[in-house]
Amino acid sequence: MLRRAFLTNSSGILLSRIFGFLRDLMTASVLGASVYSDIFFVAFKIPNLFRRVFGEGAFNQAFLPSFIGARHKGAFTLSVGVIFLGVLTLLSLLVTLFAPYFTKLLAFGFSDEQVALAAPLVAINFWYLWLVFVVTFLGAILQYKRRFSASAYSTILLNVAMIAALYLARGREGYEVVVWLSWGVLVGGVLQILFHLPSFIKAGFGRMLLAGCKHWRTHKEERQNSLRRFFKQFFPAMLGASTAQIAAFIDTLLASFLASGAISYLYYANRIFQLPLAVFAIAVSTALFPTVARAIKNQNSTEALFYLKRSFWFLLYMLVFSTLGGILLSKEIIWMLFERGEFTRNDTIESARVLSMYMIGLLPFGIAKIFSLWLYSHSKQGLAAKISAKALLGGTILSVIFMQFWGASGLALAGSVSGFLLLYWTIEAFGAKEFWGIIQDKKGWVILLGLTLVEVLLIEGSRAWLFEKVV
């Protein structure tokens, strides 16, 4: 069951990222690394940040335990939905009314002219928050019955909608293109919701919500207790699961002070970095969490550690290979995916430098995800949040320093260093003795070393033949 859940999640994420790369390929071809691409990426940053935070487990880590423990699940579910949708509606209206001020906060280094151009796009894209919450909400409920496919594959529809918008806007002026692209984001959100509804209804959750309406007032006290337990876990879980995304958001803010194109270099490189992180680390952690949580609840730490060990070694192999490939082939990857149209050779070189720095942090961020599940399963969301906050603070300080010397590459390197800080403190909280028991496998390390050497030789031996044109 665990293997099937992982394969469902990873295949869905992989297909979504493939369509995402097609979208980025078209974006790079149409807009390049220009002021218009910078404006769109700033406008899309907040909704994309929340999509990743919610979709990568923050909501589920708090909602599922509370949902399982609630006596009247329908009433509890409706309460959570009404509260979130109400807050997001008010926030979206506020951003729409005061878009220039929020835009300035997102990209403080933008000129007044750039802020004026970006503000309407920020207002449009912000409404995707409302849509992405509904998607995450439906997906979390479906995962209660181990139905992962709708959540795993729905993001493809967002990318398809954005690709369609780019296709329809081809030949138009740069700003018109980003307006079409922003409306494509909203269309994609609606399609994602519609994709979840058949599975939701088929699983019988429609009847559950109708029953929740009946129990809304009659079980008020029990419903409020469930809500208090949920929110007590949700806010720390959201912070703990969003370190990489918040760091990327801070990078965008700092990059707005650098030369034009810096935001785009970070975006394109981060998109590639996110692929192995999502396909392996996020897919494994999503599939593993219910199993570990159930074992901990049943006071079966041995079983939980067994699955953690298997997941650790699988991720170690996959992430080490991905890291080496990403660093050694950084120029080739960027060239193959993006260098066409308005995306120049200089854009390739700069984006490749950023990608190499991001890939250094792939292993620590990925491994930290599975060990943080141990903390969440023991209801230590607060401790996980403190660890994430410390790592984020350390990375932010280093970002301000490194950007003075290496520009956008320095921002990416600082993010990678924060990943090592996150991993160190997560393992410290997990327990050094338990961690030593997991990594104590001489045969595993020897095989890893041998395969790593083979990978390096294969890459270096084939690079000149395959990519002669890449500088």
Image: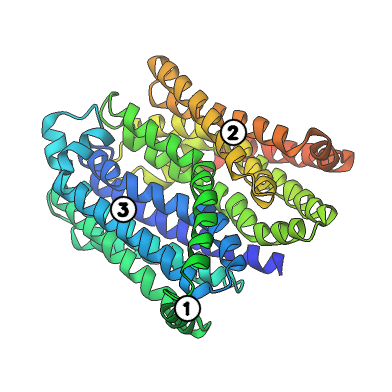
Among the two numbered marks 2 and 3 on one chain, the one whose residue lies closer to the N terminus: 3
Q: Name the front one of labels 2 and 3.
A: 2
Q: CA distance from mark 1 to mark 3?
A: 33 Å
Q: Residue at x 55, y 39 (%)?
A: 385
Q: Look at 82% across and 43% down and name the residue there.
A: 438
For disc 1, the neighbor class at 10 Å (few under 14, some 14 to 19, many from 20) is some
Horizontal side of residue 194 vs 433, given as left or right: left
Q: Which residue is mark 3?
A: 26
Q: What's the coloring here?
A: rainbow
The residue drawn where x is 56% and y is 26% is: 417
Residue type, label 3: Met
Q: Earlier in the sequence, mark 1 or mark 3?
A: 3
**344 or 320, which lies in front?**
320
Residue 467 point in image, percent of width and height: 50, 40
Q: How many marks?
A: 3
| Residue 324 appears in the figure | no
Question: Where does label 1 land, which residue?
Answer: 200
* Callout 1 amino acid: Phe
C-alpha gap between disc 2 and disc 3: 38 Å
Give the secondary structure at mark 2: helix
Q: Nearer the viewer, residue 388 or 2?
A: 388
Circle 2 sits on which residue?
387
Q: Quadrant of the N terminus?
A: bottom right
Q: Secondary structure at mark 3?
A: helix
Residue 350 position, x and y percent, is 39, 29
Specify few, some or many for label 3: CA neighbours under 10 Å numbering under 14, 14-19, or 20 or more: many
